[in-house]
Amino acid sequence: MEREGEVGLAAVRAAARLCQAVQTTMLNGGGAGVTSKQDGSPVTVADFGSQAVVNRAIREAFPDDVIVAEEDSAALRDAGGGQLSAVTRFVCGQVGFADRERVCDWIDLGAGEPSDRFWVLDPIDGTKGFLRREQYAVALALVEDGQVRWGFLACPGLSYRGVRGVVFAAGRGQETQSFTLGGAPLGSVRVAATPDLTRAVLVESVESAHTDHAASATLREAIGSTAEPLRMDSQAKYAAVSSGQADIYLRLPNPKTPNYREHIWDHAAGAIIVEEAGGRVTDCYGRPLDWTQGRRLRKNVGIMTTSGRLHERLVSVLEPVLESMTRGAAPAQQTPTAEVLASA
Ligand code: AMP
Ligand code: MG
């Protein structure tokens, strides 16, 4: 494996260990270790710790590389000294001694701006799933010249080939590979053979605020799918499609936030993992994802991911559903205002 592959894989594995340690020692009942961000979403000791551990690993291996990550230490400092002490303790558990300032510095390495070559990190994607002890992912990708080159998803709650807790890794032009959280190889990962559409399994967000459950039910009806949809948090949904546990991952803007544009850290790792496993990823209009638009996929709306050959068919079935849905929303190509983005 190239150096990028080795470093990325080791980094998300260390971060997943940290998340599991927080889960077993801090999150037993009570809300210790959990605070709310300005947008009301939860953030935990593990989100900050995971980001510190991954950023440190990347900085050490690739000192000149830009990192774009979801969290920053301002939110951690706002949460009070107890939270920072706890984060520091868990980070030390993975990397040896570091003081609080050092840990904050590592977290803030993630404040980079997307450029020709940058790493993009969601230290815990699906924080709500993490708190429910269901699905979450440490999601890391390398974007180069507008293309995702590498993607890593550590999914401690996902079962694959009889193992609970897996890491999927993909380099462009190479097959998606799977590993245990301990690093043992589990082999290459392939999407399901194109199923009879009526039996296609759809996977979508648990959170109704993050997608349009009603519209996906309409789509399922239109293709005659009788299978119940799977619902899981995080990019574990991409892992599910890449490994044949689901055939379609659909993310349609919730009617309450029609102008929401997706964050790159919620999709970069998952997208390459599905593509290198033989699947396809576009937005819900069938357009390729454009990674050159900063921290959001400003030129895209929603996400449509499939095991491949049924992709075009689904895009055309979805078209009229979208047309009725998007009345009143900003045209797809229009860049939403900062105000809209902040409220989304
Ligand atoms: P999921 O686990 O699929 O529900 O997605 C979690 C991600 O949804 C979070 O990391 C947020 O970045 C993102 N998110 C927040 N608000 C919205 C929204 N209104 N529409 C779509 N995604 C959102
Ligand atoms: Mg996320």
Image: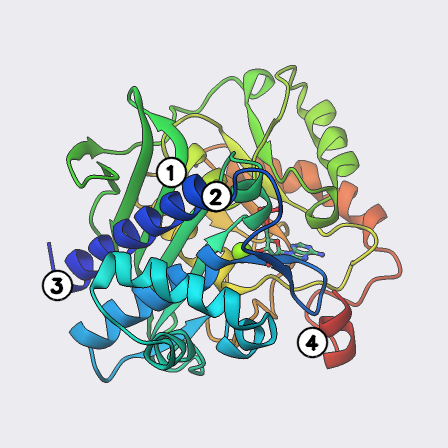
**Disc 2, SS:** loop
Q: Which of marks 2 and 4 is nearer the N terminus?
A: 2
- Residue at left offset 43%, top offset 61%: 86
Q: Which amino acid does label 4 sit on?
A: Thr
- Residue designated by label 4: 335
Q: Relative to residue 139, is residue 210 drawn left or right? A: right
Instruction: Sort mark 3 into few (<14), some (14-19) or many (20+) by Cα contacts within 10 Å.
Output: few
Q: Is residue 32 above or below residue 259?
A: above
Instruction: Say if mark 1 contacts mark 2, CB within 8 Å.
Output: yes
Q: Which of marks 3 and 2 is nearer the N terminus?
A: 3
Residue at figure coordinates x 60%, y 45% from the top left:
128
Within-10-Å neighbours for mark 4: few <14, some 14–19, many 20+ = some
Q: Where is residue 230 in the image (x, y as percent from the top left)?
A: 58, 27
Q: Quadrant of the C terminus?
A: bottom right
The residue where tag 3 is placed is 3
Real-space Cα separation, disc 4 to disc 1, in angstroms: 36 Å
Mark 3 or mark 1: whose residue is earlier in sequence: 3
Task: Name the disc covering residue 156, or none.
Answer: 1
Q: Which residue is drawn at 61% across and 37% down?
A: 204
Task: Give the Cα distance between marks 3 and 2.
Answer: 26 Å
Quadrant of the rendered image holding ligand 1: bottom right
Q: Where is residue 175 in the image (x, y as percent from the top left)?
A: 22, 43
Q: Which of marks 1 and 2 is nearer the N terminus?
A: 2
Q: Nearer the viewer, mark 3 or mark 4?
A: 3
- For label 2, the residue is 136
Marks 3 and 4: CB-CB under 8 Å? no
Q: Is residue 254 above or below residue 295?
A: above
For the residues labelled 3 and 4, the Cα–Cα distance comes to: 37 Å
Q: Earlier in the sequence, mark 4 or mark 1?
A: 1
Q: In the image shown, does 88 or 331 lie closer to the viewer?
A: 88
Judge by depth and name the residue closer to the eye, 35 or 204.
35
Some atom of ligand 2 lies within 8 Å of the CB belonging to the residue at label 3: no
